[in-house]
Amino acid sequence: MNNKTLKNKISFYKKNGYAIFEKVFTDLQCYDILRSLIFFAEKNKNIFSNRDMHFTKDKQINSIHNLKKFNKVYLIQNSPKIKKIVSLILGKKTKNFGAEYFAKPAKTGIEAMVHQDNYYWCFRGGYGLTIWIALSRADKKNGGMYYYPGSQKLGTLNHTISNKPGTSQTIKDLRLIKKFKKVYPKLKMGDCVVHDSEIVHGSSKNLSKISRRGLTLRYLTKSSKRDMKRVKVYEKNLEKNLRNLRKTH
């Protein structure tokens, strides 16, 4: 990707809160990552708590929200292309803030309620982003993500308990985003969509015959500080959500 294209991507990102970077990883690299993730998920599915792993109604793995012990994650987080994208958006002083796997299996993949990442992260005084690596095709048909471009400028909105697995809390007043147009990016294997930690987004159920698999990487500026009052509210509501889910399953 030449410098002019990169400059245009960053300009689009700053305006809209997201941008697509095509073919950051080859198909071969994606297959290798996916094989390793599937093996890791199956090996550890009985170890993870119901906070860190969620299943579909037919007991397939839908998502894993803690990949600290996934042996490839450090290499992926620090791959040259990824680091370049992060530095162009956040600057050179950044830090990793975890990674997640979204399997979203065919026909039963769970929706992600409309939300902002930073409501969960609870950071202030800095900036953050998520890099979503497509390990399969991802679009509207198989439950790909949707965004509300420009909504990152609203700041962190109030959320409420969702009573759904995976996205425990969802935006409380959807009237606040009515003026923004909803868009569904189309991703091929190896593409990455990068989004601001405060852009409003989510995804629909996957009712198609094709699983929508992706790996997310999270980054922050080193100046970012956690708001511990917000953390306590988030954790309290997360536990309520998990209790409600246990009662219904």
Image (spheres, rainbow, N blue to C red):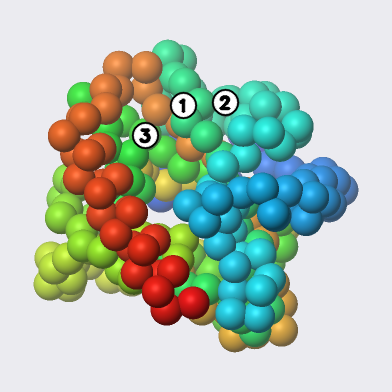
Question: Any mark on residue 127, and which?
Answer: none
Tell me the kind of residue under disc 2: Lys
Q: In the rendering, which numbered label is found on residue 84?
A: 2
Residue bearing the label numbered 1: 88
* Amino acid bearing label 3: Gly
Q: At x 46% / y 42%, what residue is drawn?
A: 130
Q: Is residue 65 visible?
A: yes
- 131 vs 115, nearest the viewer: 115
Mark 3 against mark 1, which lies toward the viewer? Answer: 3
Residue 115, quarter of the rendered image:
bottom left
Q: Marks 2/1: CA distance?
A: 6 Å
- The image's mark for residue 128 is 3
Q: Could you tell me which quadrant the N terminus lies in?
A: top right
Q: Position of residue 190 (x, y in %)?
A: 71, 51
Location of residue 169 by image quarter: bottom left
Residue that appears at 67% across and 27% down: 74
Label 1 CA crowd tier, 10 Å (few <14, some 14–19, many 20+): few
Q: Is residue 163 above or below residue 7?
A: below
